[in-house]
Every structure is written in structure tokens, then in C-alpha cells.
Amino acid sequence: MSCGCKTSGDSAHSCGTKSANGCESVNTCGNSYKLSVFDWLSNVQNPASNRCDFVEVRFKNDRKSFYKNVNNIPLHIGSVVTVESSPGHDVGVVSLSGELVKIQMKKKRFSTEDPLKIYRLANQKDIEVWQEARKKEETVKVDARKISHRLGLEMKITDVEYQGDGSKVTFYYTADNRVDFRMLIKEFAGTFRTKIDMKQIGFRQEAAKIGGIGSCGRELCCSTWLTDFRSVNTNVARYQQLSINPQKLAGQCGKLKCCLNYELDSYLDALSHFPSSSTMLDTEKGRAFCIKIDVFKKKMWFAYVDSSMAWYDFDIDLVKKLIAQNKKGERILPLEELKVPDIALPSVDLIQENSVDRFEKKNRGGFNKNRNQNPNQGQNPNQNRPNNNQGPRNRPERTDRNDRPQKTERSTGERPVNSERPKNTNPNAKPNPNQNPNQRQPKPQQTQQPKIQVEKAEADLNSEQKPQQPPKKKFKKKFPPKKDNNV
């Protein structure tokens, strides 16, 4: 037997207690059911001598009622009891006991005259019959919907609830208009062989019984803690400056959301400090009307009657001063002159989203440093290279190695100039003994240019005489397949 956590009689959602007394720690066992009540006076001793004889008993979903403990049975939250019903008896779970029951009875205006009684703690036979009846509810609901559809009734059967002893079944339905279900009751009685009770509920009560997830991502308020349904109209949305969109303002039940009433008092308190939304300002340029209100920023937007495309926002304190000037018969300045330009705060990009190369690996080491020290950085390196087609270049004679300038190409990062050394054309020539070995002879540069020109001319004649032939393709040698003697 379940302790009553979650849905009564559903052992799949229990904390594991298998006794009719229920779970003594149901308030702290971590499981909860729809519209549960926390007994915050459970550990406080009652100083009064008289103890409250009434207990609150819950049944399937959110149905609750108050019963009198005439036999003074020791009961606590989670106890499964057999109570008086008409006809027969019903089985339920105690949801509240003690002094808090008086507050709940006063809140729900429950009459203490001729109350229903608690018979006993439910025994094993009562619990078995109760659970067997609960298992048949889903099948009965499907069959009942088929029968109502066959009869052509404009109604929707929402839920089915069996009494604890199985002697009565209650059908909850929703309908827009009045339904004549006399033929329906005859069909139900002949099919299910029990007493039939029909109860019409609203669409909000239907959502509370079925349950679900709202647009906020949490369970529906009506199925968890909300007990009274207050009326909600479109004026509530207008006070909160919401767009009148039925798809966004409607809940699972198709009606306006109950949560629109939660912050209504705060909005009304804030709007009491605002001037009326129908305020008109008389300016030198023309009349202006209020077109928008921002409750959080405490600002009002105004626009001219003739040209309402340009909006100007002002604080409510300034608007009150302008209204006071109009009441004195004075016209105020144009709106564009009264508007104070907003000071743009400097934005700091903490994530560096504007940096395009934030994921690139930057070069590190001495190479970057040498490039930064190069005075000719950014210039074309080919500018310092010699061009052989421009003719001979006059170079100064170098007499000694010690007189050579120090090379700075590597330190500056420039590429060294590709200077050709003179080649010894005569291999049999003997060195001059009177000449300094460290001294270089100047190169006869006049003979170099004619030689290059002659070689180019011969290459051009050879290319004209020999026609260009396409390159030969190299084919791989294909071997014939080997013969198989076994074939």
C-alpha cells in the first residue's frame, strides 16, 4: 500500500511504505502530490485541551473534503482511511490534520453541520478493491468517449473517477453549451453496470486535473498549488503594457493565463506615479500626445499629432513640469529642443569579438625582432638585386680585405646581394708573382656582354630550326595474363 505520496492509490509514485497507517515522514520524504499542504505545526504541542476532530481527506487529483473523526482514531498525514459516502463508502488519504484544518475549513467556508464521518483505517480488502477500481478508469474513459461520439454529443469526457468500493463512477466532462445526456446515461449504465454520476467542469478545472507544462517551463499552477480561479480580462494585459495577442496570453486551457494577475498590483502601484496616458502637451510646434509608457525606466514617449513618426522620450518628472506649464496657459518648447541627447556609454569588448586574428598563431622569437629593426621593412626585396639585362655595373676596386665594409644583411634581415665573382677564363694562366694575392684584378666586363648575346642568338636559331614536338607519353608495359593449367 502506498503512503499517499503523489496520486492516491498509485503505488508507482510512492515512497515505499506498505501499511495502512501511511508514511509518518510524508512531510519530509521528498514526494508531493497535487495541491499538497505542509503541516508546519506538526512538531508543536497544542496548548488547548480540546483537539480538532476534523481531518482533510484527499481523493483522486485535486478533490478534497473534510471528515469528522468520531472514533478518535490516531491519524496523521498519509493515513489511508475508509470514509462515509453515498452510496457505500469511499477510500482516501489524509492530507492534513490538527489545528490547520480549522483554518482550511474557514477558508473554504465548509459547514460543520451534519458532517461526513470516518469509519476506520482502511484494511487490506478495502485497499485491494480500491486499487482494482483505479486500474479500470483509463479503459472506461476511452469507451465512454466512443459512446458519446457515436451519439453525436458536443462534449468532451475529461476524466473518470471510481468510488473506493466500486459502486459508483463519476464522469467529468467539458462542453460549451448545455448537453442532453439522458440517452448517454442509459448507455453508460448498460455498459459499465454501475451507478453513473455526471459532473460538468470548466476548462481551467480540466487543465488542473490533467496537468501539463506551461510556457514558462514549469508545471501548471492550477495543478500544483492554485486552488481558486480568479477572473482574468484583457485590461490586465493593457496595464502591464503587453500586446493583446491571444496565442501568447492564453494558457493550456485556452483562457487567459492566471499568472497575469500575479504582478498586477505592482504595476498598478507603479502606474499611480505616472501622468495619465491620455495626456496632451501644447507645444510651440503643435500638440503632442502620449504614444508609449515604460514602467521600468519611468519614461513616456510623445509624438506630434501631425507627424507621429518621430518619438521623443521624457522622464515622468519632466512631463509633470510640462503639464503644469500648460495648465498655466504657457506653451512649452518643441519636443526636439526639450529632448536631452543620450550619452553613449563606452562599451568594453571583453570577449574580443571584433578582433579577426585572435585565433591566429603569432610568430614569436628573434625573427620578428630583426624584422622590426629593419629600416627598409615593407620595401620590395628585389629592388637591390642586379638585373643582368641592364648592362655592366661599375664596381669600385677593393685592395684589401680589411678595407671591406662589414656585412649587415643578416643583422638587418635583408637578403644578400647576389654578386657574381669573376671566373678565370684561362685555366692555364699562371698567377703573377708581383701581384698581391689579396688584391683582385678587375674583370674585363666588355667581353661578357657580347658572349651572352651570342649565346642567346644561337638559342633562338636552334629553337626556330627545330619545331617543338609534344612530349612523348610513357606507357607501362602490359603483360598478358598467365594461363591457368587447371582451367
Image (cartoon, rainbow, N blue to C red):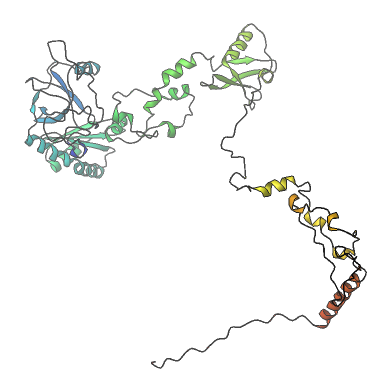
| Quadrant for the C terminus in the image | bottom left
Tell me the quarter of the picture where residue 146 sits: top left
| Quadrant for the N terminus in the image | top left
Q: Residue at x 49, y 16 (%)?
A: 271
Q: Position of residue 208 (x, y in %)?
A: 29, 31
Q: Position of residue 352 (x, y in %)?
A: 59, 38
| Left or right of residue 224: residue 456 | right
Q: Kindly tell me whether residue 437 is visible in this rendering.
A: yes
Q: Position of residue 358 (x, y in %)?
A: 60, 43
Q: Residue at x 60, y 14 (%)?
A: 318
Of residues 105 and 44, the one nearer the viewer is 44
Residue at the limit of the structure toward the right, as seen here: 446
Of residues 190 and 70, the one nearer the viewer is 70
Residue at the limit of the structure toward the top, as seen here: 328
Tell me the quarter of the picture where residue 9 sits: top left
Q: Position of residue 70 (x, y in %)?
A: 8, 19
Residue at the limit of the structure toward the front, as seen here: 433
| Left or right of residue 7: residue 454 | right
Q: Kindly tell me whether residue 166 is visible in this rendering.
A: no
Q: How many marks?
A: 0
Of residues 60 and 346, the one nearer the viewer is 346
Tell me the quarter of the picture where residue 194 sits: top left
